Image: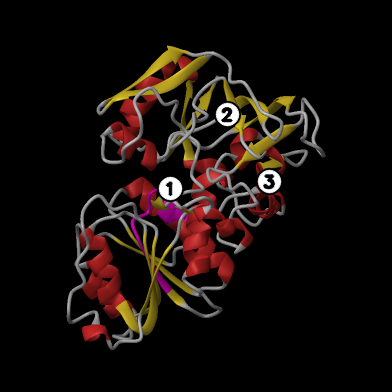
Amino acid sequence: MKAAVFVEPGRIALEERPIPDIGPLDALVRVTTTTICGTDIHILKGEYPVRKGLVVGHEPVGVIEKLGSAVEGYREGQRVIAGAITPSGHSYASLDGCHAQCGAGTRHGFKPLGGWRFGNTIDGCQAEYVRVPDAMVNLAPVPDGLSDEQVLMCPDIMSTGFAGAESGRVRLGDTVAVFAQGPIGLCATAGARLRGATTIIGVESVPGRMAMARRLGADHVVDFRQVDPVEEILRLTEGRGVDVAIEALGTQQTFEACLRVLRPGGVLSSLGVYSTDLKLPLGPFAAGLGDHTIVTTLCPGGKERMRRLMNVVAAGRIDLGPLVTHRFKLDEIEAAYDLFGHQRDGVLKVAITP
């Protein structure tokens, strides 16, 4: 099969690989559509380490090609998705309800991100076929009538962005700021609206993303190249600050800005992937006495999460199809990485079809 492989920092290339073998609890899925994530760009740049030769990608939509001997409740030929996070369902973390950290704490020491396996610790799905581990925990049938592109965001960015609003405890009538309106931030904006926020303030400078933010629920979009976003958000809230600030970029500047616009007792919900140490500014942190909550979230996975997200799409509560701005064949994966990695031509998300 053809597969996109991490060769070395700065290079992901298309290679020929054997079709994966599967075990009793696994499924082999023929990938019909996948996409590239910002985390894949961190891998490409060498900012997040994975082993050389790994097949990358963690957002599969496809058809069951083969089922493991112990897998029940599914059939070959069935359309399915699997989340970017694939918990085992029987680890301590899974049984404690923390599916994203499945397998993170072991007798060999602590390792975060245990539930993220595709394109991290096992071969991923930017390929013609992918082995889905623990299939009965992770495969979610795609409802009739939904296209690949309608559910393409469910495995990662929709789940992650919505989780930013959920972990942030957004309530009816809340004011929410979302810093950065890339794909994750846009989904966080949509999630805040679905949770009942009545004032949502996006922070962005790219015109296309600003327009998409308004389309998905932002009441105000602050262009940080034109005004100081902290000052503008405080003006919009009459000095009160926001109830929830969602950080969706992964930089010191945006993390600190979230803290500066947060009301006392508010929640900073962090979704960014950080590549350097973070510092807490003394004043906005109120010397540790501001009753702030700072929470981080890794994309929730598993079939029940996927089922719920697809229900939201099927019910017409949200349409994330417009986030797909470019389409490539798997043979063009290197060009797709070049476009997405350099954020050219107004790209939001790309659809990759083997």
The quadrant holding residue 145 is top right
Tell which circle, 3 or 2, labels the residue nearer the N-terminal end: 2
Position of residue 3 measured from the top left corner of the image (x, y, whole percent): 47, 19
Q: At 56% across and 79% down in the image, what residue appears?
A: 172
The Cα atoms of the two marked residues, 1 and 3, are separated by 26 Å
Q: Is residue 181 magenta?
A: yes
Q: Is residue 231 above or below residue 49?
A: below
Tell which circle, 1 or 3, labels the residue nearer the N-terminal end: 3
The Cα atoms of the two marked residues, 3 and 2, are separated by 21 Å
Q: Outermost residue, bottom direction?
A: 289
Q: Outermost residue, top direction?
A: 16
Mark 1 falls on what kind of element?
A: helix
**Left or right of 43: which side holds 169?**
right
The residue at which mark 3 appears reads as: 137
Position of residue 105 measured from the top left corner of the image (x, y, whole percent): 46, 55
Q: At 64% across and 53% down in the image, what residue appears?
A: 305
The Cα atoms of the two marked residues, 2 and 1, are separated by 17 Å
Mark 3 falls on what kind of element?
A: helix
Which portion, as a residue range, is magenta?
A: 176-187
